[in-house]
Amino acid sequence: MKIKLATKENENEVVFLFQENLDKNNPAIYSQEFFCPFGLKSAIQRKQVVVVLNEKNEVVAGLRFYPRKRDGMVSLYQFVIEDKYRGKNLLRKMLEKTGYKKFEVLCPIEIDFNEYYKKTDWKLEKKNNNFNYWVLDV
């Protein structure tokens, strides 16, 4: 498998990957912006999307990140890994490919997906009424 920054050539495949794997009823999806193909394409142009290509050169995983200017933290905005490729530590490998070292992700407090962050070594940094703020150093 190959991990790389997404390019214009990957654009349609990346949009399709996210559209096919993001469920509008998933409580982890707290903003309709996650479904906007234009935002995803813009992030690709800004070099803020990492993808995983399988042996057939198909996009099977991706993440969108945003380096914040105000505090130097990098926000993991969203990620998708096809079922078949889960459990292979791909999220961490994609994060490493960004070139950044520290990441933060928001997760709604009441959902089970918080267990994923806990078991994959993210640290709960803070919480508010709605979100847990998980941080990972890679």
Image (cartoon, helix red, strand yellow):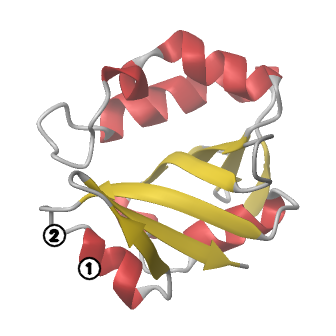
Q: Quadrant of residue 54?
A: bottom right
- Secondary element type, mark 1: helix
- Please state the horizontal and vertical placement of residue 95, each as a whole percent of the image: 70, 64
In the depicted structure, whether residue 134 falls above or below residue 63: below
Asked if residue 50 can be seen in this view, the reply is yes
Instruction: Identify the residue shown where x is 55% and y is 72%.
Output: 135
Residue sitting at x 32%, y 29%: 31
Q: Marks 2 and 1, Cα distance to the nearest angstrom?
A: 6 Å
> Which x, y percent locates residue 16?
46, 26
Q: Is residue 22 left or right of residue 27?
A: right
Query: Residue 6, how many percent across, how many down?
Result: 76, 37
Residue at the extreme top: 38
Describe residue 135's horizontal placement relative to residue 103 as left or right. Answer: left
Q: Amino acid at mark 2?
A: Asp
- In the rendered view, tell whether residue 61 sits above or below residue 127: above
* Label of residue 62 in the image: none
Label drawn at residue 115: 1
| Element type where label 2 sits in the image | loop
The type of residue carrying mark 1 is Glu
CB atoms at circles 2 and 1 under 8 Å apart? Answer: yes
Indicate left or right for 90 with 2 as reference: left
Extreme-right residue of the structure: 99
Q: Quadrant of the C terminus?
A: bottom right
User: Which dot marks residue 112?
Assistant: 2
Residue 59 rendering spot, x and y as whole percentages:
60, 44
Q: Residues within 10 Å of mark 2 (few under 14, many from 20)?
A: few
Residue in the foreground of this view, choosing between 30 and 51: 30
**Residue ID at (81%, 56%):** 98
Tell me the crowding category of disc 1: few under 14, some 14 to 19, or many 20 or more residues within 10 angstroms, Cα based.
Answer: few
**For this rendering, which residue is in front, 38 or 27?**
27
Residue 19: quarter of image: top left
Quarter holding residue 132: bottom left
